Amino acid sequence: MFTAKKGRLAVMGVVAIGAMVALAGCSSSDPLKSGSTGTASAGTIAIGSQAYYSNTIVAEAYAQALENGGFKVDRKFNIGQRSVYLPELASGEIDLIPDYSGNLLQFYDANTTATSEADIEKALPSVLPKGLRVLASSAATDQDTYTVTKAFSDKYKVTSLSDLSKVTDPLTVGANAEFQTRPYGIPGLKSDYGVTASLKAIADSGGPLTVAALKDGTVQLADIYSADPSIKANDFVSLKDPKNMILPQNIIPVADSKVNSKAAGIIEKVNAALTQSKLIAANAESVNDKKSAAVIAKAFLKDAGIVK
Amino acid sequence: MNYFSQTVAFLFDGANWASTSINPIPVRIGEQLWYTLLSLVITAIIAIPLGFYIGHTGRGRTIAVSVSGGARALPTLGVLTLLALLIGIGIGAPIISFVVLAIPSVLAGAYSGFESVDRRTIDAARAVGMTEWQIVTKVEIPLGLPLLIGGLRSATLQIVATATLAAYIGAGGLGTYIFLGLGNNDFSQALAGSVLVIVLAIVLEIVFSIVQRLVVPAGVRAGRSTSTRAGATRSRAVVGSPLQEGNK
């Protein structure tokens, strides 16, 4: 009995030490980075996408337009976070990815003072790693918004973030956990608009749970992306941001040298056709009608006259 | 600095323990423990009587085994999301999904505890005139206790680890550090949350092993394999029945 106890303690100790060694071995490399997937073969453009359905639709549209233009394409979709795919882009494992302008700039320059889309796009080329460039952006933007219900907006006559200080009831924001620390999150609300709010961390990035919490009044404000079809579907009101606290997030392709000028021309044509309403419509087809990215992208390109 | 030393620094930074912090560690640990205990109590209220009934009567065993086996395969994140959409954000949805997660272990522990009791012991109890109720309370429950507690132990471990998902729908707990860390690429914070969960799990294991020693009757413990192994095997042969029945 006694020895059995001691033995168990010893096993626990060994496991604990083993874990420490393993953790220490992690060092400071990115634990979420997947193993190398190998560089795409010459002449093929490897297109990546975020693990976000809307981004994948845009990436798929680029892919189909490029294929239509005679390019060979390798789809490496659903890569995940910026900290994973941007290094892959720099190392040539992918050659092209649709990104979002404000967050892209902040990734390379956390202290940027640029707040307008024009300033952001002016600042981007100088911060990108060597060999990477951005192509002409789309007018469509998919950025964080503070969104309220129509009833809330009417009751307090709130249409802009600067109106929020008039609201006397306590305010709770439903958003991802990182909203607690982001400059456009709870801290920005306080410093830019003088509004004190608490966070209800809901980890589905403005998805159905966040929408449900806004509808049932658990939260008064929700961070829902501007291209999300649920805003229109529920008659929500996205509050204006007169002080440009939230960075614009226009869709902007990042490319390496494998994307030649002909390919860039095709991608920029797709971007020119991709308006805000087209993007929302495409997202709605994915969310409401459960269509695949390939089907949605094809219909969009046909409609725009880019493919036949 | 690597992630591990940053994690240690995070855990030993007094500011993270102070109540002025956005996520004070004691508060989050308290939430994690509260969700674990609440789910465990609800699970016990549902699964233990049901398991005893199945174990005593043998009825419904096939259904219980297949249903609880199926429930084990349910992804808790899916259950949680579905419930939160139905009943809203709050602690209701996470608690129900943790109960669904924990029921199979406790149920299995309860009925297999009863089944582990030697049939001859039960026959003997019946032969000396015990009522069915007495057989349950004086024979089957005490003798089946070690397996039941084993079931509760593994259920606790599963809940305390899975309770990190409460943070997915804003109910706090130690998952807060994990989600916040992942969202901000602050992996040392995510790791700190995980380390706290591991520590909590080990502490609960130790508590359970103490409880197990306290509640299992001395007579039952004497009959357990560990103590027979510790005792001299030869003396047992002498004490045991000299009439071998050939099937043992």
Image (tube, rainbow, N blue to C red):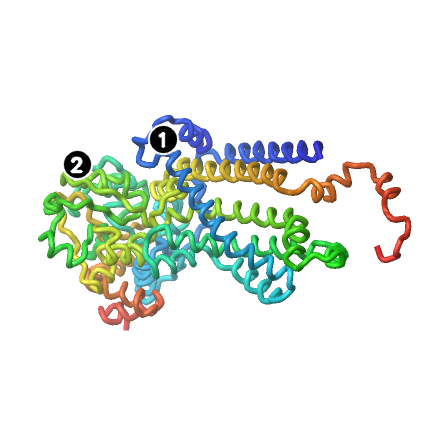
Residue that lies at the very extreme toward the front in this rendered image: B129
Any part of residue A83 in sight: no
Q: What residue would you read off at disc 1? A: B16
Q: Position of residue A35 (x, y in %)?
A: 48, 47
Q: Which mark is residue A191?
A: 2
Percent x, y of residue A224: 24, 54
Residue B55's tag is none
Q: Secondary structure at mark 2?
A: helix
Chain containing mark 2: A
Q: Nearer the viewer, mark 2 or mark 1?
A: 1
From what the image shows, is residue B206 above or below residue A204? above
Q: Quadrant of residue B7?
A: top left
Q: Amino acid at mark 2?
A: Ser
Residue at coordinates 73% horizontally, 41% vertically from top-left?
Answer: B222
Q: Is residue B83 above or below residue A173?
A: below
Observer-nearest residue: B235 or B105? Answer: B235
Residues A12 and B210: in front is B210
Q: CA distance from mark 2 to mark 1?
A: 23 Å
- The location of residue A151, given as percent across then percent down, is 15, 58
| A64 and B223: which is toward the camera | B223
Q: Residue at x 43, y 36 (%)?
A: B192
* Quadrant in the picture for the C terminus of chain A: bottom left
